[in-house]
Structures are given as structure tokens and as C-alpha cells.
Amino acid sequence: MARPATGEGQRAASLDAVLARAGFTDVPRAVGLLGSGLPADVLEALTEDASRTLLEAFDGVGDPDLALLGLARLGDAASPEVRGRVLAAVVDGGPPCRNLLALLGGSAALADWLVAHPDDVDVVLRPRNGVAADPETMRTLLLEAVGADPRADVPVADGSAFDGRLDAMRHAYRRLLVAIATEDLTCRDPESFQPEVAGALANLAAAALEAALALARADLPDGGRQARLAVLGMGKTGGRELNYISDVDVIYVVEPAEGVEEAEALKIGTRLASGLAKMCSTPSREPSLWEVDPNLRPEGRNGPLVRTLSSHLAYYERWAKTWEFQALLKARHVAGDAALSEAYLAATRPLVWDAVGRENFVADAQAMRRRVEDHVPAAEADRQIKLGRGGLRDVEFTVQLLQLVHGRVEPSIRSANTLQALAALSATGYVGRDHAAALARCYRFLRLLEHRIQLFRMRRTHLMPTAPQDLERLARSMGSATEGAEDLLARWRATRREVRRLHEELFYRPLLPATARLSADDVSLAPEAAVARLGAIGYRDPQGALRHITALTEGLSRRAAIQRQLLPVMLGWFAEGADPDGGLLAFRRLSDELGSTHWYLKLLRDSSAAGERLAQLLSSSRYVADGLTRSPESVAWLDDQAELEPRSVESVMNAMRAMIKRKDEPGPAIQMVRFVRRRELIRGAIADVLDEVPATTGERVITPVADVALAGALRIAEVEACRSLGLDEPPSRFAIIAMGRLGGAELGYASDADVLFVHDPLPEADRETAEKWATAVSSQVIALLGSGGSEPPLPVDTTLRPEGRNGPMVRSLASYAEYYDRWALGWERQALLRARPVTGDEGLAERFVALIDPLRYPEGGLPAGEVRELRRIKARVESERLPRGVPPTHHLKLGRGGLADVEWTVQLLQLQHAGDVPALRTPSTLGALAAAREAGLLDNEDAEILQEAWSLATRLRNANVLWSGRTTGNRVDVLPAERAELAGVARLLGFPPGHANELEETWLRAARRARTVVERVFFS
């Protein structure tokens, strides 16, 4: 339509603006197209407002310029009658108009086909037999197109392919394809609609294969009925998730008809299969459909095109690789002899679900995915929608591996369709609901992206375009899924990242290879098989274990379903520990506590480490099992190695202070202090069990959290002492000095906290009041940390104070100075070697250290008389303090070559030489030992022997607690005599099963060698 003369410039500008807003990129050309032909007739038939509405309708199509050009071309190509129908539909502006514009602007290839076949425009204006078409309807339409009877057992075309029947089949196929594409391009929510479109394309492909087979039969005598041929769809065809243009993967199975030799049937079957493929791809007047790809067959390209059923089975049973069973998961009947297809599926399905039992099945599947990824050309890696990182293959491989591992005992997840299988995996608890929803959303988006890219030119590609105009058209064709090219690219990249993350979480689950290694009976937890397995792998009470299993797995809840996945593997992991029965019992208790939470079972199922770590902990350490039961939220740490690292003293102190600040009463406040200590102890214990109980835990974890607990208790005690005495401010400075193993930063899980309390009255304070206050503070600290309650106590021991139990609990700094000046004994000098300020007034602590340094680091060394006295006391300790009935060789603390031997030896060297060797002035046993070696006071061999014995004794004491859960009693310090306990401790220290005696021999040898050094260095 020519522009009106009146107000021509203004109207032209207005039209240009409308076209630009509608998305036209070549506005002058669009104006030219609107000036003649069918577009001009449309505008002529409309009012100006209606014309604007029509032009704005182009905004909803992928490429408005292409759609307008296609409309003009269609008008030129159509007969007057068809042109009139198109004109009426467009002028009406309803759904037929939207359908036509969407197709013309969404697919250049299908627009070309429509221009070449204008009489078929009704399939676009009013689509029929599109996405919702029944597969049988599609089959009927395509068979009728070649003159075959759809009801016949063996449909045969009524003429040769090259007598027009091939083009008729392809024309019928293209009509159905155009109907599907039209519905797809006009859908309001194309992402949600995508699975239905992919299913319709797969059904259409199956119908085309049936028609192609009918054409192939027409070229053979008697229609090739001497051979029964079944065509099975594989890949996306089998899964009913086909693309617009893609190779159609198939496998052929042939059987001879009655009275026909097998060789003859194979010959005919080969001709039929070859003919079928030719009908789909050979050049003709109508466009080819796609390539038929039979390379998923046994032996691939090197194998025969068709095989009998028995030949297929022989190959799969003997030669097939892991990927071939994965491929068979998608197999379904698509054409030919349906009964033969069903026989094939019935025979191969068990092989598919049993394949998981093959050696290295999971590793092979994972390696295959990596190989696919590695073969993507570097230039395409960042553009690949299908094969690259975060692409469609990541989703498909993930889903298929989960199906293959779990499908042998869970029939409901055996779908050939990716999204249906994913939904089933989620419903049965094999994939978390959030993970499944995210994967499904990403998969639909990627498939829609792939569809839109392929649909435009009907070319097989899986690469993201790079040209700006192509990206803009793609973004528009995605509907409301994206807004503009930049938004499309951003969403695509985010989708790739999310897919890759989920793929790596699910595809590399440690549960998968562990489950694959189990038999089907083991995985199913069938009672008889479970009892037999439990007994065989080391459970002492298989029947009792079965009761726990039943309690955890019975019912139809999601919780029970996930437990049924976890337990077959975790039972084996428990059995790798020293106490599988105890581990399972602890797991049941923990699951009863946490099983209803949203994260616990999901963590164990999805984490790369948490499940196996938990099993190791529960079956190896009652201390950790009890700790996790009391703090079940700590299980979440097992998924993150950083959470198992010791917290800094500052961070623990800050957490403790924040907690007690919210408590007004001393009881709740001290429970928070003790809670923080328990939390950090269980963190340290978990790390110990997982790392063979290193000797450094006392220094890195146990001592620092004891320091924090003392600081918290002192803070509370000072406030309470002021309150009880009616004081506004403390009348004295106060400090706590660590002694013994606390002072040396060598606490074990069962250690008390040895301390000294010191105070210094303020100048203006009343001395008696200050003394009362300091005594109240000391008593409060001991009571707060040592009393009963919901949190474990930290016993505070002050017996290393001057005069021991007979002396006052707390002294002023001046009183300490007077006592040490007049009465200090050799053993007190020795005890002070470990003195270390912990908390309180820093200035007071520094003055106390300055006071005791001359005592513990005497110039010129220790007098000979005091050395003799120390040796006498040591001999007396050995003869009097060793518990009755405990062999001296087995007591880790007081026995021959034990902790006391090493520590007294090192401390004697400190008393004798620290006045002259500053490096010896340390409360740490190993630190002083290293300094003595460096100073030449011990030779390297002696130092290494003492260090080995001390470190092993320290590890054994902690392992005793971790294994038994006991933190009190003499048995903590004794190498276990009972074989079961010794075995548990040995396993904690990294000895293999059955090597408990080796641990005992290792200790006896280390202690014996250390005692030899002690007798030479200490007692000589």
C-alpha cells in the first residue's frame, strides 16, 4: 500500500517508529514490502489503528523482517483462492494470523517449504495432528501416504519410492512437522511445552521409519516377508525426546519367517534396513528427513547391519562395553515387527539392569563422560549446548548413571525419557527434590535453546550462535524465557554453571561405585540375604543389626526411601570400622534425632565424603558417636574439610563471649561456656578419628578450648563474687596460671586442668575483703567448670599450689613471693617449668612469671642435692603410684618408658641448663626436647627415641578415650589388655584389621627404648 500524500512525512515517521518498536531491523525494506503484494492488501483492508495492531503483532515472532518477507513471498506463490484465505486470516488478526507470523519468522527453512507448498497453509493457520497427535494417527497418515495399509501385519507401499511415493511420504511428514513447529512457536510457555514437542517429534520419526520400511519392502519380492524385521529406536528417539533435526539412532533385529533359512532372512533384513535408511536421506524433490544412524548396534560400524535376537544376546552377554548397556536403556520399538521388538526388550532389559555389577562399571561410565567432553574441539567448547561442560550430556549422563546403579531394585526409575526418569528418581529419593527441579528446569531450557537454533534452518547443530542478529532472533524466539541477547547469554552461562555443579555432585557420588559393587540382594536388603551378608562382613549380632535396618527403612516415607539407598553401602562402611554393630546403633540413634530434618539424609546421599566419614566415625569412636548424638548438627561438618580444622582461639573466644553476654544468670552462662568447649572438642575428635589420632591435638584443640573455658568461667566468677560480697568493682587483680599438661599445651581428652590462682589487691582495697573476693572467685571457677549439668565438666585441680592440698586455694602475689623465697622445694621448681598464664590480669600474670623464672631456670643449674631428691621422688612414684594389677610396661603415663619418664627427663635437663640455654625455657615437652637436642644435651638418636615414645603414649591415651568414650578412670592411661579394645585402639591409630598385637609390640618396643635413655640420662 502506497503512503497517503496528506501528512506523508509525519505518517512515514510514525510507521517507521511502529516497525522499529516491533523489532524490524531493516525498516526501509519493511516499508517497501508493505507497499506491494499481500502485505499491502492486508493494510488496505484495515483501518490505521488496526494496521498498527497488526504490525505490533510482529513483535511476538523471532524475526519480524523474515516473517514479513515470508508473508510477501507466500502471497506471490499462492493461488488466488489460497491467497484469499491467507489474507482473511491475517486481516482477522486472531490465532491463525499469530500462527502464520510465528512460523514465517521462526524458521526460514519451514517458511521456504510453505512458500513452495502454499496449498498446505491450512496446516499452519489451523494446525491439526501436531504435538497432541496420537502416535498411531501419525503412523496411519504416513503409511497411507505411501499407499500401505496401516492395519496390515506387514505394511507394504503400493508402489515404488521413485514413482512419487517417497515424496508423498516426505510431504506428509513435513505437514505434521510444520504443525508441531507452529504449535511450538506460538506456545505461551515454550520451556514447559518442550518435552511434549520432543515427544511428538519422536513419534513422528517413528511413523516415518514405519513408512520408510513399507517403501523398502515394496522394492523386494513378496514385500520381503521372508524376514521379520524390528526397528528399535535408540537415543533421543527411544527416549521420546527428539530434536527437530537429528540423526535417528536405531538398532535392527531380524528373525526368519516360518520355513525360511536364517541366512536368507539376514540377507533380506539387510536390504530392508538399507532401503529404510535410503528412504529417509536420499535426495528427492521433497527435502530429506534425517540420517538413520545404526552405529549403536553391536560392534558399531564394524558389525553386521542386522542381527538375529540370539546374536544380539550373545554379543551383549560376552563382549558389550559399559556404554552399550547405557545406550540400551533408551531402546523402544519404533517400526516393523512389534512382537520381535518386545522379545528383544524382554531379553535385553535384565542385562541392562544387571550391568551395574560389572567390574568398574561406574568408573567406566564416568570416564566415558570425560572422553566425550575431551573430544569437543577447543574452538567449540564455550559454545556447545550438548556435549560441553554444563551441557545436555551432563544432565543425561547423570540421570542414566543413577538409573543404571539403582534401577535393578527400583523398577519405577527405568524410564527411557530423561525428564520422566529424573522425576522418578526424585520421587523415590535418589535425587533431592531441589536438585531434580533445578536439573529439569535447566534441561528444558537447554533443549528449547537447541530446538530454536535447529528449527531456524533445519540444520543439525548444537552450537550457540555468535552473530548479534542471530542471538537477538534466538532470544526473541524463546518467548518469555529471555529478554534480549544479553539476557539470553547470561541465562545460558548461569544454566551451564548450575548444570555442571549438579552433575559433579550427583555423577561423582561415592555412593554410586559403592552401591554398584553390591549384589542385587545386598542392595535390596532382603532379610535372609542381609543377615548372611552382615555376618560375613563382621557384625557380631546380625539379627540385632537387621532390627535396626528394619526400623530405619520400613514404611513409604521419603525418609525411609533414602535410608534404603544409604544403608546397603553404609553397612559395608560400618564393617570397615572396629565396631560395626555399635556404628549401626549410633547411626540409628542419630537418624532418629535428625531423620526428619531437610538436610541430614540429603547430605549423606549427595555428599562426596559425609556418608563414609560418618560411618567411619560411628564404628570407630564411642566418644564421637556420643558427641554427635548430643550435637547432631555437627554432622554437617563432615561435608567440608575446612569445618574440621581447629578454630582459632580468637574465634572461639568471641563465640563464647557472645553467648554468655545474652545470659543474666551464672548457671545458663557457664553452660554456654561448656557448650563451646564440647563443640570444639567434638570437632577435634572427628578430625582425630579421620586422621589416625595425631599427637598434636592437645596443642591445637584441647588445650586452647580449655583456656577459653577458664577465661569464660573467670569472667562469670568475678561478677558473681562481686555480687555476693556487695561490691561494685573487683577489689583485686586476678589471674589464672596453667600448670601441668594444661601449661604445656598437652591436654588429652581425659585431662584435668591444673592451675594456680593468684591475685594482687588494689592499693585502695581492704586486704581482708580482697582475700575473701579472690577466694570466692577461685571457688566459683572450680564449681562452675566442675559441677554437674547438661554439658561435660572440666575438672580444675589446684594441688600443685604451694603446700598442696594443705595450702590456701589462692594466694596474693606477695604471698607466692614469700613462700617461694623461703620454702620452695625441687619438685615445685619442676612443676613451675610448665607454668603458663591463661587468663586474667595480664600485668599480674607477667609479674608472676617474672617471680618464678629464677626458680625454674636457676643460674648455674640445680644443686646436686635437689637433683638427688628429684631422682628419689621419681623412683618413689614408680613404686607407689602405679595402679595395682597394671603391668609397668602397659601404663602409658607412669609405666616404664611412658609419659612421666620422658617428661621428668626433659624437665631435669631444663632445671639443670635453662639458666644458660634460653631455648629450654618452654612449658612444652617436645619443644624442650628439641631445644635439648639442638644444645647438644641429648644426641639425635636419644631425642628421637624419647619423642617417639612420648608421642605414641599421647596418641594412645587419646585413642583410649575416643574408642571407649570414657574420660575418667585408670583405664584411660593403660594400654588395653582386652583384645577387642586393643583392636579398636589399633584401628584408630591406623593399624590394619587383625594387627592389634602389632600395636602392642610397637608400644613395648618404643617404651623399652625410651626407658633405656631415661635410665642413662635421668638416673645416671
Image (cartoon, rainbow, N blue to C red):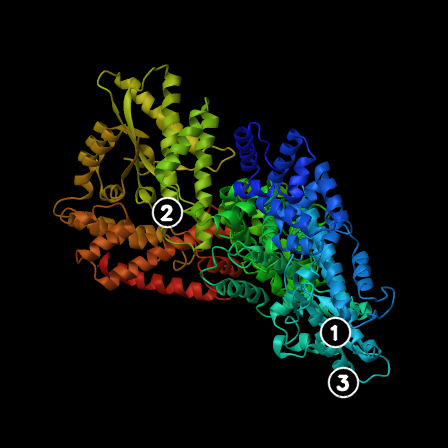
Distance from disc 3 to disc 1, alpha carbons, whole Å, reads 14 Å
Q: Where does residue 872 sit, x and y in percent of width and height?
A: 26, 51
Q: Give the number of the mark in front: 2 or 1.
A: 1
Residue tagged 2: 698
Q: What element carries label 1?
A: strand
The answer to whether 213 is drawn above or below residue 117 in the figure is below
Q: Residue at x 44, y 36 (%)?
A: 676
Residue to which mark 1 is pinned: 253
Question: Where residue 104 appears, x then y in whole percent?
Answer: 64, 48
Q: Foreground residue, 300 or 966?
A: 300
What is the CA distance from the residue labelled 3 to the residue labelled 2?
80 Å
- Amino acid type at image mark 3: Ala
Displayed quadrant of residue 575 = bottom right
Asked which quadrant contains residue 600, the reply is: top right
Q: Is residue 131 visible?
A: no
Please tell me which residue is depicted at 12% across the width and 45% down the height of the picture: 859
**Residue 416 occupies quadrant:** bottom right
Instruction: Determine whether 862 is above or below 722 in the image.
Output: below
Left or right: 380 in relation to 895: right
Above or below, 874 against 597 in this view is below
Q: Residues within 10 Å of mark 1 (few under 14, many from 20)?
A: many
Q: Please indicate whether residue 303 sits to the left or right of residue 831 in the image.
A: right
Q: Is mark 3 on a helix, strand or loop?
A: helix
Q: Mark 3 points at which residue?
A: 263
Q: 419 and 480: which one is in front?
A: 480
Q: Which of 509 and 376 is in front in this view?
A: 376
**Residue 766 percent across, percent down from the top left:** 26, 16
Q: In this view, does 604 lie to the left or right of 793?
A: right
Q: Does dot 2 land on a helix, a strand or a loop? A: helix
Residue found at the very far front of the displayed protein? 5
